[in-house]
Amino acid sequence: MDHSELTARLAALIEVDALNYWEIEDYVEQLAAQPTEVQEEVLRQVGVIWPVSQALCLDFLDQVQRGLNCLHHSRLGEWVNATLDVYEKDGLKQAQRFLAEVESNFLCQIRGKSGLGLTEAGGRLLPYLRGLAGRALDLASAPTTYTDSQTIFLPPEITLCKEKRENFLTYKLLASWQWGLLAAGTFSARLTPEQPLIRELIVRHGRRLSSEQPFPANFYHLFPDPELAGDLFLLVETVRITKLMRQELPGLMRDSAPILAQLRRQRPALSGLEGKNRLLEALNHWALTAAPPESAAGPNAKLYARAVELLLPLANTGGTIDDSLGITAQLYRLCERLPGGYHPEHPPILGGRLQPRAVEAIRLRRREESRQQFIKALGAMLAVEAGENAPPERHPAQRQKPSGLPDDAAAALLPPPAKGGEGEQPLKPPPAETEYITVGGREIKIPEPLRELAGEIRQDLGRIPERYISAALEQAGTAAVGGPGPDPNEGPEATGPLLYDEWDYRRGGFRKNWCTLLEKQLLPVSSPFVENTREKYRGQLRLLKRQFEMMRLQQRFVRRQKEGDEIDLDAAIEALIDIRAGHPASDNLFIRLNRDERNIAAIFLVDMSYSTEGWVSTALKEALVLMCESLQVLGDRYAIYGFSGMRRSRAELYQIKHLGEQYDRKVKGRISAIIPKDYTRMGPPIRHVSRILAASEAKIRLLITLSDGKPEDYDDYKGEYAIEDTRHALIEAKAAGIHPFCITIDREAQEYIPHMYGAVNYIFINDVKRLPLRMPEIYRALTT
Amino acid sequence: MPAPEEKIAEHRITTKPFYLPQGDEVEIAKTAHANQLPLLLKGPTGCGKTRFMEFLAWELKLPLVTVSCHDDLSTSDLVGRYLIKGGEAVWVDGPLTLAVRAGAICYLDEIVEARKDTTVVIHPLADDRRDLPIEKKGELLTAPPDFMLAISYNPGYQSVLKDLKQSTRQRFVALEFDYPEAELEARIVGRESGVDQATARALVRVAAMTRALKDSGLPEGASTRLLIHAGKLARSGIAIRTACRVAITGTLSDEPELLAALDEIVSSVF
Ligand SMILES: Nc1ncnc2c1ncn2[C@@H]1O[C@H](COP(=O)(O)OP(=O)(O)OP(=O)(O)O)[C@@H](O)[C@H]1O
Ligand SMILES: [Mg+2]
């Protein structure tokens, strides 16, 4: 592409007025040097990022040269996707940083060849990890390997081995190993100055147990060289966890032997190292493959042998975190005998160092969440209990504080929140305690739904703080005297704004929480529209009603069955005649009650965009009237919603008739009130009504959309993007057990239609006047 | 046509079934029987409900009539019907009637699969009337004291349609079954398939991991039954990873990435 073409293409993608002319020039200058396929790929990615964040997109353009130095252009998409994930999770700053750190994020040494990206590995690795952990851990990419106990961070790409399969195995090993840390309790010990080991260390090194540092960082800081202590602890834990993994995951460890050997080959040679560095590296070698390094018998062979001796019991029979702490302290003393300082220049064994602060942050967040959840849930239960047991006028009395324990006293019993681990109570109370809590002086059994949460809180804090319970009581009191609920006659309230993802085909992923959908009520108008329509189609309507009535009765009885609930008299008489006549008689003599009662829920989703103005809108409304009239006799449950809106911040859904509602004056008034509004963003309304349908109790769930052409919104929801999102929303509906069916009214068939609806059924109507009568026909065909 | 006594004799359990209790379920079920209360067994597939019923029947020395319910099951399928035999209409008892007459245990497996209108016939039988009306014959059977009705259902099914009606469920003593706790399950797997305890434990570990995948798109984890299958294959000389793949992972999902992840689980443990 030449200069001017590039400028034009770029300007078409991004709003030029957001930039100065010379800024665009800069980017074009850079890109012009690239071959066309690279330029195309960059432009494609610009199209992906710009609508999500303009600032990030400009950053991307700034960094793309560096990215291309490091990545093959076919992998730009992966880079961009990873960046957008960071953006959606942690915001712009972090995403910009992620972009800037492309080299370390994508371990660039061996470019392209056999490397395996985390994005590619994740599809299989994530469920594996969740199965292993028994909970919903997440995976994310980061320059080094570590875990915060909620997410396991792994390098974005692994190129350790020649084969993809082996690189996957490396991912699997690293992820399993991080799980091992969590399973083995590497982060969950509590230190107190009273513990003999800690007391001894305090005396020996004259340092205090820090209350600022979470475990195990507070442990390292008991030593004069925390860095050395930290790496020793990591080594010891490696040995302990490797043992655990050999026990729990023998297959993995067997398969991984070549990987571990490879990792060991990548460690620095001992010959270039001295003193503490050398000893530690020798032990790292040993820990990886349990074989002594070649030059172990160097200057400090004795110390090395002694260190291995200390580690062997852990390697052979395993141990607890306390064992690890003890051994770390002993190793530290061995190291002290060596001259010189400790200057770790090489990456730590098996990925990364521990990140106690990250774990602590998650722990505190979870503590706060479970506190809120617990109070809310217990409060709600107590409120229900109070409502059931007490006459309403007694409610105010229930609001009093729990007897005996004034709030402040209860709070005083709490271990200091959000402080380091050491001030807290020992964990693991006897299991029986999990069953009961004391509420207002009386023991109550923890209600089933709260058990797990209560267990979690006890795990964390040692017990359930009184404060949680008094807060729940407080809340229960307020709820019980709270005002009356919404007036049931007012009909369903329009719900608050709801967020929906949107599918970006270029990215092959969702834009998270991208659209805001508002569910609104359409105000009924009094108009002769429905009556006029009935009059206009009077003859046809009579026919339709008969047809629909037939559907109701259709196939209720199947005759001439081998068995059934009733004797089929005709068949029986025939058979008797046959016998008399000396013929072999049929034994299909029964009538069977057909089980197929209609159990159908349907939602009609109607386009209310401005393009329906005129005939189309009228035809749509007439179609709805005929549909409702026909369905009256059939008795299927159905709902009608209209949709329109403008931009992703305002997708609107108008409730015309909900599933439980009768076809009454109000509904008729709302159908009459349908008028063309704004644009056609189809994704959010499809996703929303799919949810409603999925929750309905029907055996067959139908989603029938009526629109007048391409989905389109005021912003970038156009063309391929809009079609792909709509298509994806329909596929999602299908996956949720819904049968989507689309009716499109357009003067001529467009090529996009088969693609958009390819996965679902659709019908195309080019003569809008035929719609009103076609619609009940279609419905009939769909449901018989 | 065999006489009723002959027919019920087929349902007697002749050898003691192997069953390891998970808790006090045997005692509760026996007490329910003594008090003429019907049983509702809840629990995921393959966790031992059927085996438990066999064991209970053996302990109570009663025949066990089992009906696997399906969505075509009609009232007549349960109660009985007239059949034309040699030009004559002959009444044939259904399994439920058979069990009521003989004072046996009638076990309706997967009751939610049955049509709603079918489920209703058990109502008078499941409350203190203990009656079974046979409308076609104009007969009202009252169950003898030994008769016991038991139904099972798997609450794990997603569909709201497959839920048991309140009016039905509120007649029963409910026993909740789940996969046995790990050590017990390993013993069951070892005993039923013949693999050694170490293998059995590893199989149970695989199962636990698959059961944790509920939120990752796997509708149900591996049942005890599947572990036994894998164990049996391994016992007969199939490599253990292969045995797990065909007997466990392959049956749980068709989704390629989930399948791959399940295979990774297997190859980690074995
Ligand atoms: N507690 C147990 N004692 C002995 N064997 C058991 C036990 N639990 C399960 N099993 C074994 O598991 C297998 C499957 O159990 P069973 O057929 O009873 O499951 P189920 O709950 O009836 O399943 P479904 O709901 O699919 O019918 C049995 O064949 C038996 O070998
Ligand atoms: Mg069974």
Image (spheres, rainbow, N blue to C red):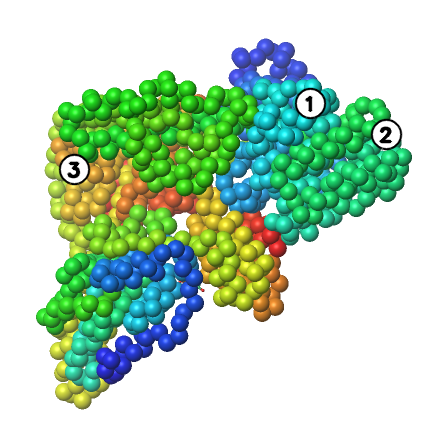
Q: Secondary structure at mark 2?
A: loop
Q: Residue at x 35, y 57 (%)?
A: B25
Q: Residue at x 30, y 47 (%)?
A: B160
Amino acid type of the residue tagged 1 in the rendering: Val
Please give the count of numbered marks on the rendered protein.
3
Q: Is residue A613 above or below residue A691?
A: above
Binning the other alpha carbons within 10 Å of mark 2 as few (below 14), some (14 to 19) or many (20 upward) gives: some
Determine if the C-beta at disc 3 is less than 8 A from ligand 1. no
Q: Is residue B1 above or below residue B159?
A: below
Q: Chain of mark 1?
A: A
Identify the residue under disc 1.
Answer: A203
Viewer-closest of B55 and A534 = B55
Q: CA distance from mark 3 to mark 2?
A: 87 Å
Residue A522 place in picture, x, y as percent: 23, 26
Amino acid type of the residue tagged 3 in the rendering: Tyr
Q: Earlier in the sequence, mark 2 or mark 1?
A: 1
Tell me which corner region of the image, top left, top right, bottom left or bottom right, holds residue A447. Answer: top left
Quarter containing the N terminus of chain B: bottom left
